[in-house]
Image: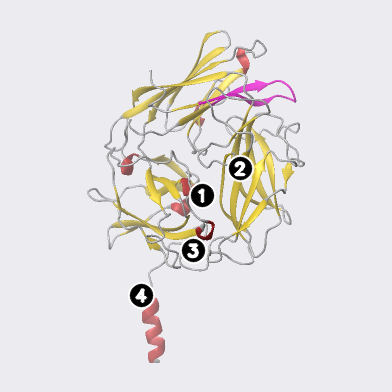
Amino acid sequence: MNRWVALLLLVTSMIVPVEVAAQGDAETDAFNPDETVVRYIRAYGGSNELSPPIVLLSGNSTAAGIGSSVATVEFDISAPIIPNVYAQIVHCNADWSEDGNGFLTSVMQRTSLIDWIPAPQRARYYAYRGKLQIPNPQLELRFSGNWKVKIYDMDSDRLLAETRVFVVDQQAFLQLQFMTDFYEPTARVSSTALTLEAIVDAPRTSLLDGFQHTVVFYRNHRWAEPYVVSAKYREDVTRDQAGTAVRGFFPNAKIFRLSRVPAQNEYRVLDLTNLAMFPNTGEAVRLPLSDQRRNGMFDRRSNDGALVTTMVSTAYDEYVPLEFVLDPAPGYPSLDDVFVVGSFNNWTADPAWMMRFDERQGRYRLRQWVRRGMHDYLYATGRVDLQQNTVQRLSYEEWEGNTASASTSWIAFAYYTMQDYGGYDGLIAVGASNIYQGGR
């Protein structure tokens, strides 16, 4: 055999496979110049990244003090030139199933009023950032409820990405209260849980008690994890085997109770604003220290689940190829799959964010592209459903522990069956609190 061929074979056999994510390879050119791909999408209220994407209908205000006149949808896209895309909004039921109501949703409810910002010259993962506001001169919001914002390729009508926005028509008051509870954890962690009560008071006589049917609870910014408490929808849409109950205690008022919800833990914080620690060299940057298991302990407060980029200059507002490292010591590797979940992937456990266990070094690893900024995140376990490409039995117990001291905010939305336009789930109240504000 030619000695150069033998040498090439030897070098090839020594190359370590690179973690390939659905969004892109962290060690190669990040995008195909001939393909249009949305890398990341998020929504928030007004111009404040910390604000939830809650739009108040004209003239409304909320007792909770949350909500804005507009929601901002922001998405990063890789494309050879500024892409030809549009956004369409689709009305949904309280459980986020699309309701198919032609009076509310039509093909005309779309907009192309998108502000485009070129990525920094050094950026390899995306080429343009699109921003749009909802509502805008092309897109009016007349009905309350859940709305999906879908981004489409205008040339092919291919769906590129979607996010979620809430529209509230304040007609009732929602008070959110917390109580300490217990549950049966699967891992050896504290059994501390929370019970949340949303007291919905609808003083207007035009609101009928029988149509006030559902409250949905979310941890702030984790819109892919609804906890549905409803007299209308099936109980199996509730997560974590939590208990639910709906009770009326006087006319036009009801209590919606969510019980035995694991308290979880304060979020881990990933600060990518330090250019010295996380330079963009083209190589994957490893976290300076391996993350460890936690047992209900934390040393800093988080940003309540949000991505914060206000301190990042325009010249460095890019994505960093990053290697997450998780050390199972002093325990053993998990029997389940392990995922990184946080603000960088909209708090959604995804097979593309599953870690691989390196038996030689005894650590979990994952290489991914992460936008520069301040992120909150956690490590989760679950099982990948290969047929549906989803993650089942998601849990944060094994790696994060469980503590009632976490300051995570909860937001609750109250739904009412509106009788006009064929009937739909409208949003009549919203409330927000945490264990330090809403205990009793």
Does residue 379 appear anywhere in the picture? Answer: no
Q: CA distance from mark 3 to mark 1?
A: 19 Å
Residue at point 64%, 34% (across, down): 69
The x, y position of residue 287, in whole percent, is 35, 57
Kind of residue at badge 3? Asp
Distance from Cα at disc 2 to Cα at disc 1? 29 Å
Q: Nearer the viewer, mark 3 or mark 1?
A: 3
Q: Earlier in the sequence, mark 2 or mark 3?
A: 3
Asked if residue 129 is positioned above or below residue 216 in the image, the reply reads below
Say what secondary structure mark 3 lies in: loop
> Which numbered disc, 4 or 2, marks the residue closer to the eye?
2
Q: Position of residue 398 (x, y in %)?
A: 31, 42
Mark 1 or mark 4, whichever is nearer to me: 4
Q: Which region shows up in magenta?
A: 413-431
User: Where on the picture, by quarter, is residue 148?
Assistant: top right
Residue 195 coordinates in the image, percent (x, y): 40, 23
Q: Circle 3 sits on which residue?
A: 25
Between the residue at mark 3 and the residue at mark 4, the CA separation in whole angstroms equals: 19 Å
Instruction: Specify whether residue 373 is painted magenta.
Output: no
Mark 2 against mark 1, which lies toward the viewer?
Answer: 2
For the residues labelled 1 and 4, the Cα–Cα distance comes to 31 Å
- First along the sequence among labels 2 and 1: 2
Kindly state the secondary structure of the residue where label 1 is placed. Answer: loop
Q: CA distance from mark 2 to mark 3?
A: 29 Å
Residue in front for this viewpoint, 233 or 270: 270
Based on the displayed image, in which of its 4 quarters is residue 232 positioned?
top right
Can residue 370 be seen by looking at this rendering?
Answer: yes
Q: Which residue is mark 1?
A: 389
* Disc with the residue nearer the chain's start (1 vs 4): 4
Residue 348, placed above or below residue 277: above
Task: Name the residue located 75 percent from the left edge and 25 percent from the top edge.
Answer: 421
